[in-house]
Structure formats: structure tokens, C-alpha cells
Amino acid sequence: MGIHKLKAFTILEVIVAVSIVAVGVLALSAGFIYVKNRNETTHRRLQAQSFDREILETLLITPYDDALLNVGGPYSAESISPLPSCDLKDIFGASRSYTVEQITEGKKITVTTGWTESNGRAEQEQLFGLVIQP
């Protein structure tokens, strides 16, 4: 009877294969964390745009000579519509303001919401509108 040699992986081959799989899993997990953080930032940007739109719409229907549209600023937008309780306000300290500039056609309104991300980076969203002089 002959001796049959069994074919199998060596321990070194197994270690190399597990290492390659581990590096791949780490790379994927880093990608998932990046996407999760970008998704959260995008959610806050959408919240800020929604809140800015609310203020801008109120200012756009305001009479041209109303005190809310006095040229200057930044003015606090909280007097027009307080920022509701949300993560953008409660966790990230968001604040809203608006400015009014006199231009040839009327008044340009800029509404800004600013906040600080958890990594310390300052973020802001701005919307612009134009009130035509009657």
C-alpha cells in the first residue's frame, strides 16, 4: 500500500488569506462610516434649507416698507419664526439670521443658518430672495 499525501492549506496560507479578508473588511467599514457621516450632514443641510425657506417666504410676502425689510443686518430670524426643537438646534447650536441689501431692482434678502459639526467644522446654508420695489 502506498502512502497517500493529503493536500491541504498550510498555516501560512490561511494567515495570509485571513489578513487579506481583514484588510478588505476594514476598508469597507471605513467607507460605511464616511457615508454615514455625509448622510447626517446632508440631513442637517436639508433641515437648514427648510427653516431658511420658511423665513424667506415670510419676508418675501412682507410689505416693501415694513420694518422687517430695513436695509442692514444681520437681523435675528428668531423673532419671525423661532427655530423648533431639533438636533440642528439642540445638539449643533444652529442659529439663523438674515440681511437686507438695497439693490437697483429692490431689496435682496439673504437668510443664513449656521451650525458647528461634531468635528468642529463650521457649516452654513444660505437662501436668497428678491423683493421688487413697487
Image (spheres, rainbow, N blue to C red):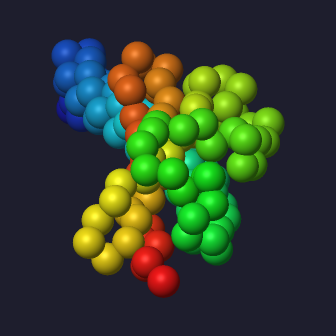
Left or right of residue 11: residue 83: right
The image quarter in which residue 11 lies: top left
Left or right of residue 127: residue 18: left
Q: Quadrant of the N terminus?
A: top left
The image quarter in which residue 101 lies: bottom left
Q: Residue at x 40, y 65 (%)?
A: 107
Q: In this view, does 62 lie above or below 110?
A: below
Question: 37 or 48, which lies in front?
Answer: 48
Furthest toward the bottom, the residue is 134
Q: Which residue is drawn at 63% across and 60% down?
A: 66
Determine if residue 43 is in view.
no
The image quarter in which residue 96 lies: top right
Q: Which residue is drawn at 58% across and 31% down?
A: 94
Question: 117 or 98, which lies in front?
Answer: 98
Residue 40: image location, x then y, percent: 53, 42
Determine if residue 122 is in view.
yes
Left or right of residue 43: residue 83: right
Question: 63 or 25, which lies in front?
Answer: 63
Residue 83: image location, x then y, percent: 72, 41
Q: In this view, does 83 lie above or below 132?
A: above
Q: Which residue is drawn at 42% across and 43% down?
A: 72
Q: How many labels does the image show?
A: 0
Q: In this view, does 83 lie above or below 122?
A: below
Residue 15: image location, x then y, percent: 26, 18
Residue 53: image location, x then y, percent: 58, 63
